Image: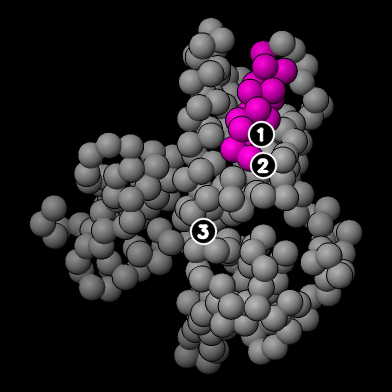
């Protein structure tokens, strides 16, 4: 199910979503559709799209904060809107060789053993990289909080690829455009934290992240002259500290 909400800030829009839908913040994914910072002659404005497979409190969630997008009785957007959201597939989504067939079958069997139905297809092909897309009615569960379930499935897929003698190929799993939405969210977060750090001349520690998410934060802020980043902690999920250059590390 997909809903849209508005607010003066991202937090206000998300708070309205939790109130209208009767869900907790970790029970849905947020996609920022439009944002406008407040200024001297204009108010701040944020419009978000909420993706969830959870049953909502108010059904169609009509009420304050929800924009006027029309959805059918199954909670789907109009065809044109759904097509514009669909992930691009570079080439044939069907397996082209034995390795791709094995990877698709492996991921599909993983999902089946978890107790969920779903189909797996090729999302994209690059040199030393292949993307697989999972389509399932239980996508929100397969993705998990902060994408941790999807990351775990992806790790297993890469281990399996190595056992097939393809250590040179990195396997990327995605579902419901989660990777794209997560990347956009992290880029916005990085710039927001950078602004706060520059204003306070201090540092801020972000939540634990996987290597890909940490690298995205580092890369996003790499060209900001007076802000630096570093990873802290042990293990796979480390934290990124964003600090104003010149402060103690």
Q: CA distance from mark 3 to mark 1?
A: 30 Å
Q: Is residue 13 visible?
A: no
Residue nearer the viewer, 148 or 184 = 148
55 over 117 or under it: above or below: below
Give the secondary structure at mark 3.
helix
16 over 176 or under it: above or below: below
Instruction: Quickly name the residue at label 1.
Output: 112
Nearest to the eye among marks 3 and 1: give it.
Answer: 1
Instruction: Quickly name the residue at label 2.
Output: 116
Q: Residue drawn 51% across and 58% down?
A: 185
Q: CA distance from mark 3 to mark 2?
A: 27 Å
Residue 2: % across, % down: 71, 66
Q: CA distance from mark 2 to mark 1?
A: 5 Å
- Residue 212 is left or right of residue 130, and the answer is left
Q: Is residue 101 visible?
A: yes
Instruction: Quickly name the residue at label 3.
Output: 185
Magenta residues?
A: 99-115
Q: Residue drawn 75% across and 77% down?
A: 60
Give the secondary structure at mark 1.
helix
Residue 40: % across, % down: 47, 90
Q: Earlier in the sequence, mark 3 or mark 1?
A: 1
Give the secondary structure at mark 2.
loop
Q: Residue drawn 23% across and 73% down?
A: 200
Q: Is residue 236 magenta?
A: no
Q: Earlier in the sequence, mark 3 or mark 2?
A: 2
Residues at discs 3 and 1 in contact (Cβ within 8 Å): no
Residues at discs 2 and 1 in contact (Cβ within 8 Å): yes
Q: Residue drawn 26% across and 58% down?
A: 205
Within-10-Å neighbours for mark 2: few <14, some 14–19, many 20+: some
Residue nearer the viewer, 215 or 246 = 215
For the N terminus, the quadrant is bottom right
């Amino acid at each position: 199910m997909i809903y849209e909400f508005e607010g003066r800030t991202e937090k206000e829009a998300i708070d309205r979503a939790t109130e209208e839908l009767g869900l907790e913040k970790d029970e849905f994914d947020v996609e920022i559709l439009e944002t406008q910072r407040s200024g001297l002659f204009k108010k701040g404005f944020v419009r978000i799209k909420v993706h969830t497979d959870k049953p909502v409190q108010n059904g169609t969630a009509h009420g304050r904060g929800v924009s006027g997008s029309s959805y059918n009785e199954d909670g789907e957007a109009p065809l044109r809107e759904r097509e514009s959201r669909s992930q691009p597939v570079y080439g044939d989504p069907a397996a082209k060789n034995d390795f791709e067939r094995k990877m698709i079958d492996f991921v599909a069997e993983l999902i089946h053993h978890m107790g969920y139905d779903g189909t797996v297809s090729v999302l994209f092909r690059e040199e030393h990289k292949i993307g697989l897309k999972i389509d399932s009615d239980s996508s929100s569960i397969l993705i998990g909080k902060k994408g941790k379930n999807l990351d775990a499935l992806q790790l297993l897929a890469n281990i399996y690829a190595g056992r097939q003698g393809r250590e040179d190929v990195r396997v990327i799993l995605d579902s419901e455009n989660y990777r794209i939405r997560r990347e956009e969210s992290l880029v916005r977060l990085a710039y927001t934290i950078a602004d706060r750090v520059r204003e306070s001349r201090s540092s801020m520690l972000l939540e634990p992240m996987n290597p890909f998410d940490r690298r995205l934060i580092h890369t996003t802020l790499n060209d900001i002259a007076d802000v630096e980043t570093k990873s802290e902690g042990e293990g796979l999920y480390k934290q990124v500290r964003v600090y104003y250059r010149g402060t103690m590390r």
